[in-house]
Amino acid sequence: MTNLPRGWAQATVGEIADLTDGPFGSNLKTAHYTETGPRVIRLQNIGDGVFRDEHAHVDQARYERLIKHAVRPSDIVAASLGESVPRACLIPGWLGSAIVKADCIRVRAHEGIDPGFLMWMLNSPPVRAQAASSIKGVGRPRLGLGGLRNLTVPVPPDKEQRRILAAIEEQLSRLDSGHRLLRRALVNIGRLRSAILMEAFAGDWPLEPLASITDPERPVRYGILMPKEHVEDGILYVRVKDYPRGKIEVKGLRRTSAEIADKYRRSTLRSGDVLLAIRGTYGRVAIVPDELEAGNITQDTARIAPLPHMDARFLATYLVSEQAQRYFRRVARGVAVKGLNIGDLRTMPIPVPPLGEQRRIVARTERELSIADAMTAETDRAVLRSGSLRRAILGAAFVGRLVAQDPDDEPASALIRRITAARAREPNDPRKRRKAHV
């Protein structure tokens, strides 16, 4: 925070704003929440510059007991817990009565400090980087009230703050519009993929149960229940998380002991087997590569060993089609975690064109899907670039590179002196001071 632009000054957040965190301990617990009443601002309400309308309420009596933690429109609320602190947003005008919860900090800017400007500054890369050095804890990284209060920030003249805020909002509005279009494009590409697969399997072919097109000596079955700890020279095994995009990530696979693998030798893998996720993220599919010959799977995956008249790529492609996924959704069972029963898989109807036609369908479908994949990859790159642009806009804003400076603006040092003087005149009685700021 050195080499400030002309007319700017340095200050801590605690020097330019009043900070209050939420009540801790028994003052506010989940058991106190009600269906209606004043709102409770929690971490899930705080986005990067966006207030998320997630609901939690307390009754009026508890709200009045915790009134010193109340917020009002244009207050800033900042997260003091998590990786991206001090993530912050403004309290919207429509919210009504509300208090902050523990791990949320109310930041109320002093006169001359624009709340929107300060909110975006707290979300900026330089302040985030500075906050990272003050975070305590590993499992629950926390900045805390003192950490936020002591962050050093650059302060422009008040008129320049408003010019910067207007420029940020204009640039981010354009960026957000583009981001929404990219997200819509990804949805449309997903629909295109579904249409390609629907068309591929729209033929009038005989249907056979999955069990009848698999090797009778290697029927459809799941694998190891408890692989236990990793064994460095053990047997490779595949989990559902190991094939997130239809390809097994062999380098990241774990190994189980030969003894455990031998107990589940009936689910041993061979090159060309088809794997199907059957629990949790059911419906995910992959083909076993040569490197996994004699490997195994866990209980969340089913191994399918197609007979020679069934092309493995055709079967794998069909299993990710909307026709197959619709079947999976219909037969899936469970409440907290849904899954597919092996019996339902074995009776699943599979279209069986002649082998030559299977291969032509796969070749055509893979060509068309490769185009959709390229479109997805390019759109994903654009989404990542939009995130980089967002950080660049905020980074430029708070080093004086986003808007032109006006030499006639009153320097920020004078503004900070006025704030300091005004704070010195505030009541010394903490109860009066709280009352003055609610």
Image (cartoon, helix red, strand yellow):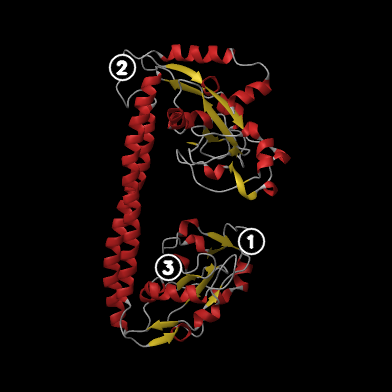
Q: Which residue is mark 3?
A: 290
Number of residues whose C-alpha sits closer than 10 Å to that of mark 1, classed few (under 14), some (14–19) or many (20 or more) = few
Q: Identify which residue, 149 or 26, lies in the foreground.
A: 26
| Between marks 3 and 1 in the image, the one whose residue lies nearer the viewer | 1
- Quick one: SS at disc 1? loop
Q: Identify which residue, 117 or 237, lies in the foreground.
A: 117
- Compared with residue 152, is residue 390 higher up or lower down, i.e. above or below? below
- Quick one: SS at disc 2? loop
Number of residues whose C-alpha sits closer than 10 Å to that of mark 3, classed few (under 14), some (14–19) or many (20 or more) = few
Q: Tell me what residue is drawn at x 33 percent, y 71 percent.
A: 197
Q: Which residue is mark 2?
A: 406
Which part of the image, by quadrant, shows the N terminus? Answer: top left
Q: Tell me what residue is drawn at x 34 percent, y 25 percent.
A: 163
Q: Identify which residue, 77 or 288, lies in the foreground.
A: 77
- At label 2, the amino acid type is Asp
Q: Tell me what residue is drawn at x 31 percent, y 16 percent.
A: 406
Q: Quadrant of residue 299?
A: bottom right
Number of residues whose C-alpha sits closer than 10 Å to that of mark 2, classed few (under 14), some (14–19) or many (20 or more) = few
Q: Which residue is mark 1?
A: 228
Residue 378 in percent (x, y) is at 30, 52
- At label 3, the amino acid type is Asp
Upstream in sequence: badge 3 or badge 2: 3
| Count of picture labels | 3
Upstream in sequence: badge 2 or badge 1: 1
- Compared with residue 314, is residue 180 higher up or lower down, i.e. above or below? above
Upstream in sequence: badge 3 or badge 1: 1
Q: Quadrant of residue 60?
A: top right
Residue 297 in percent (x, y) is at 54, 68
State the CA–CA distance, disc 2 to disc 1.
67 Å
